[in-house]
Image (tube, rainbow, N blue to C red):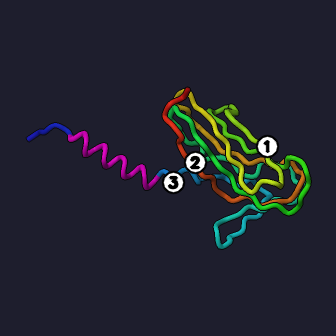
Amino acid sequence: MQREPDGAAINALLDEVFSKAWPERVQRLSVSPGHRTEQREDGVWIHVAPGMSAMVFYGPYTPLRAGRYRVSFEFRWESDVQCSCVRCEVTRGVNAEVVGFQDVGPVATRATLDFTLAELAFCCQFRCISLGRAGFSVRRGVELAMVSSETS
């Protein structure tokens, strides 16, 4: 005996799976070679030595639907130089087109970047890049929130 699919039940199941899997999926960030990770009470942190100019982490190469988003990175600094030491970026697509960035210096323990995607985007990354001007640690992970499904 055949019956019509229960669309509401299917959507509820998909929403439940998504709500459990998505937070972990966003944290699948790759750490570039040459950086030491350290487990601390409040999570895993990546140490970046002074003078090291390189990509610290990147990923997770995930799709994001159209909308306005906010992503946050967390830092601990080893010096108090008065310049930008890190670039936080959001990219999309296989060519890593930058859709938003923020340069950060030792006065900030948190960098929050707002960005908008006008349409569904694939291969989205959250990237932390050391500019080589100071030693610091960055939490291995980001906080991502959709602010609005509106793009204007």
On the image, numbered disc 1 is attached to which residue?
A: 103
Q: Provide the secondary structure element on which disc 3 rests.
A: helix
Which label number is shown at residue 144? 2
Helix, strand or loop at mark 1: strand
Q: Residue at x 58, y 40 (%)?
A: 69
36 in relation to 60, above or below: below
Q: Quadrant of the C terminus?
A: top right
Q: Nearer the viewer, mark 2 or mark 3?
A: 2
User: Who's the residue at 55% across and 42% down the image?
Assistant: 62
Q: Which residue sits at x=69%, y=35%?
A: 100
- Mark pair 2, 1: CA separation: 18 Å
Q: Is residue 75 left or right of residue 82?
A: left
Q: Nearer the viewer, residue 20 or 101?
A: 101
Q: Which residues are magenta?
A: 6-21
Question: What is the spatial separation of the Cα atoms under label 2 and label 3, in whole angstroms?
Answer: 9 Å
Amino acid found under the numbered disc labelled 1 = Asp
Q: What x and y, as percent, mark residue 60?
A: 60, 47
Label 1 near label 2: C-beta < 8 Å? no
Where in the figure is residue 79, as x and y percent of width and height?
89, 61
